[in-house]
Image (cartoon, rainbow, N blue to C red):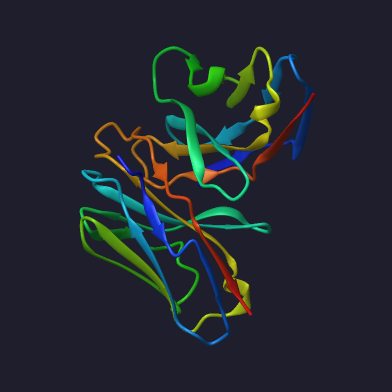
Amino acid sequence: AQSVAQPEDQVNVAEGNPLTVKCTYSVSGNPYLFWYVQYPNRGLQFLLKYITGDNLVKGSYGFEAEFNKSQTSFHLKKPSALVSDSALYFCAVREGGGADGLTFGKGTHLIIQP
Amino acid sequence: DAGVIQSPRHEVTEMGQEVTLRCKPISGHDYLFWYRQTMMRGLELLIYFNNNVPIDDSGMPEDRFSAKMPNASFSTLKIQPSEPRDSAVYFCASSPRQGARGETQYFGPGTRLLVL
């Protein structure tokens, strides 16, 4: 079975500082990894994904994520945080060759302080 | 493109009543997914369709839940009878062909259901 862990319920970062939201995963085969963001009372918005190729993936709004196979991690990063980045972030995984539904982590609240 | 459309956005009902949630996927997408979000269990996959055919309904919590996709542009998720523990946000998502199994799922705004 596949699973995703987001070890931090909340991350607090000062505006302008770099941010990292952690994600680790477990799958039997090759992982397809995704990050989504959810603003209050809104649906999930796709940020970026890793399927294959370069381990560093760049996505929307200046976010990027690094796939690390040995550590089974896919941490979300941004060099300089904005107050508008404050939201709930979800990491998700799907096993390559497996079922098509996504397995999500519990989510991490990102709070950017002015 | 209008994106994935869900209706209603909010639903308040009494225990025992039938609830029907609706979803219109993005035109041309072959896959449709229903997810449920609760504080306790997070985001869970309930069921998904490929070309209008249900593929995996193992996430449907019990027989009170049913889903249909009569055509490529419409799907329903029905709860009958509803119970307070069904209160959650229900999301519909769609994606293009899963040829590489890496296609992105695009989510609708969700239906917030409250069962009293």
Q: Residue at (23%, 60%) from the top-left corner? A: B53
User: How many numbered circles does the render carry?
Assistant: 0
Q: Quadrant of residue A76?
A: top right
Q: Quadrant of residue B3?
A: top left
Given the current orientation, which residue lies at the most extreme bottom position? B16
Q: Tell whether A31 sits left or right of B55.
A: right
- Residue in the foreground of this view, choosing between A94 and B46: B46
- Residue in the foreground of this view, choosing between A107 and A18: A18
Q: Tell whether B67 sits left or right of B86.
A: left
Q: Tell whether A53 sits left or right of B41.
A: left
Q: Residue at (33%, 44%) from the top-left corner? A: B2
Q: Position of residue A49 (x, y in %)?
A: 45, 27
Location of residue B82 with respect to A94 vertically, above or below: below
Q: Tell whether A27 sits left or right of B1.
A: right
Q: Position of residue B35 (x, y in %)?
A: 47, 56
Location of residue B63 with respect to A42 vertically, above or below: below
Q: Is residue A65 visible?
A: no
Location of residue A53 with respect to B67 vertically, above or below: above
In which quadrant will I find the C terminus of chain A?
top right
Q: Residue at (24%, 35%) from the top-left corner? A: B99
Q: Residue at (40%, 25%) from the top-left corner? A: A51
Q: Is residue A4 visible?
A: yes
Q: Position of residue A82 (x, y in %)?
A: 68, 22
Q: Position of residue A69 (x, y in %)?
A: 54, 21
